[in-house]
């Protein structure tokens, strides 16, 4: 082997080190959290049981067709409400029975805020993140009091 062949082989090996895997995605191992989140639930109680914290849970039912339109606003609302409220987004198509039972199958997004396992408020077709935070925040601990026990 001459010197230029060795240099070429070294450069080729280092360049392909960052190339995507040629293995199909099905062979990429999944962690337990991903598998758990892909589980199918039968009732709202089963979904709410995944969030045992003592803070309210905002369930956001959305349609696949509007997902791209609302994703950024829901993400911003989730960040502004963190430590005060848990936000869980559910595709209406994945849980049509639950969406219909909770009157969330027709309008998108349809959001229900649960506190102590009971619905306390609903938002229909609210997409602007500040509107979501203002309405949901009324039922949550005030900002800055995330670690103060409530009576």
Image (cartoon, rainbow, N blue to C red):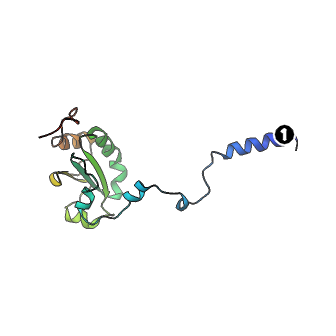
User: What residue is shown with label 1?
Assistant: 4
For label 1, the SS is helix
Position of 3 compared to 71: left or right?
right
As displayed, is residue 37 above or below residue 137?
A: below
Image position, residue 124 (x, y; %): 20, 52
Classify 10 Å Cα crowding around label 1: few (below 14), some (14-19), many (20 and above): few
Residue at 22% across, 65% down:
100
In the rendered image, the quadrant that contains the C terminus is top left
Q: Residue furthest right?
A: 2
Q: Image check: 19 left or right of 103?
A: right
Question: Relative to 70, does residue 150 appear above or below in the rendering?
Answer: above
User: Toward which corner of the image does residue 50 lie, by quadrant?
Assistant: bottom left
Q: Position of residue 8 (x, y in %)?
A: 79, 42
| Residue located at (85% from left, 38% from top) | 3
Residue at (79% x, 39% y) in the render: 7
Instruction: State the residue in front, 142 or 129.
Output: 142
């Amino acid at each position: 082997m001459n010197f230029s062949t060795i240099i070429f082989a070294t450069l080729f090996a280092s360049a392909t080190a960052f190339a995507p895997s040629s293995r199909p995605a099905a062979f990429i191992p999944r962690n337990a959290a991903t598998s758990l989140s892909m589980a199918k639930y039968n009732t709202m109680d089963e979904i709410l049981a995944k969030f045992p914290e003592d803070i309210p849970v905002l369930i956001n039912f959305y349609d696949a067709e509007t997902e791209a339109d609302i994703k950024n606003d829901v993400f911003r609302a989730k960040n502004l409400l963190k430590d005060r409220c848990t936000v869980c987004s559910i595709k209406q198509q994945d849980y049509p029975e639950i969406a219909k039972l909770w009157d969330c199958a027709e309008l998108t997004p349809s959001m229900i805020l649960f506190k102590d396992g009971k619905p306390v408020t609903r938002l229909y077709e609210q997409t602007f993140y500040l509107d979501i935070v203002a309405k949901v925040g009324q039922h949550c601990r005030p900002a800055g009091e995330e670690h103060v026990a409530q009576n």
